[in-house]
Image: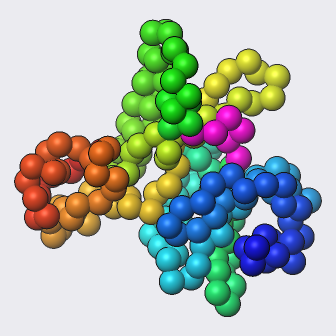
Amino acid sequence: MEESELLKSQGFQVFKTLGEGSNGKVFLVHHPEFGIVAAKVIQNENFEAREWDTAGIFVNDPPNIRPFIIQNIAAKGFDKMTVIILEYANIGSLKTLIDTNVDISIPVVRLIMNQLLEGLRYIHSKGLIHRDIKGGNILMHNPPGSGRVILKIADFGEAKLKTEINKTLLMTKAGTPPYMAPELIMVGDQGRVNTD
């Protein structure tokens, strides 16, 4: 409740909670300046500045160059919490779709994989490794009136620059175990692999 009160005090109209994780909550909100967006509210002790800094690497490229990456719009720190304003993906996550157990046609699976791989190609071209690719971090958006679904890779809290990894030659285990690259699990805590 404290999170939604903070958002309201900053001029946001809070519609609903979109999700809740160990690090914070995400709300569907409206703001006169931003329109309908997602607001991620994180306790300051859990806030990873790396997530915001990493997203800044994408800022110089126009959205049409990075259509498969969720856009970070703004961030502001408060006494106890930090608020990150994100582009809102109006369909939800790939995990939600998978959990419904609906049959997905092969052409749709191909489309999903193509967009996911294009997003990863873009991330890697910027010298980043996401390190936490999973259904819950792959969002889906249907631009109103388009009839299309666009995948959006989100949550760069575990991302690292390839140069950071190569400098130390150490890659700590990061991510969600069932979704981690097998190479990372097999080589242990001090694996020398760059994986997504």
Q: Residue furthest bottom?
A: 79
- Which residue: 17% across, 43% down? 182
Q: Position of residue 151 (x, y in %)?
A: 56, 33
Colouring chosen for the image of the structure: rainbow
Residue 56 in view (yes/no):
no
- Left or right of 31? Residue 146 is left
Relative to the observer, which residue lies in front, 98 or 48? 98
Residue 92 in magenta stretch: yes
- Which residue: 34% across, 53% down? 176
- Left or right of 26? Residue 167 is left
Residue 124 in magenta stretch: no
Q: What is the span of residues highlighted in magenta in the rendered image?
A: 88-93
In the rendered view, would you say 177 is above or below 81?
A: above
In the rendered view, would you say 136 is above or below 48?
A: above
- Residue 142 lies in quadrant: top right
Q: Position of residue 120 (x, y in %)?
A: 39, 39
Q: Residue furthest left?
A: 187
- Residue 63 lies in quadrant: top right
- Left or right of 11? Residue 169 is left
- Which residue: 62% across, 50% down? 71
Q: Position of residue 70 (x, y in %)?
A: 59, 47
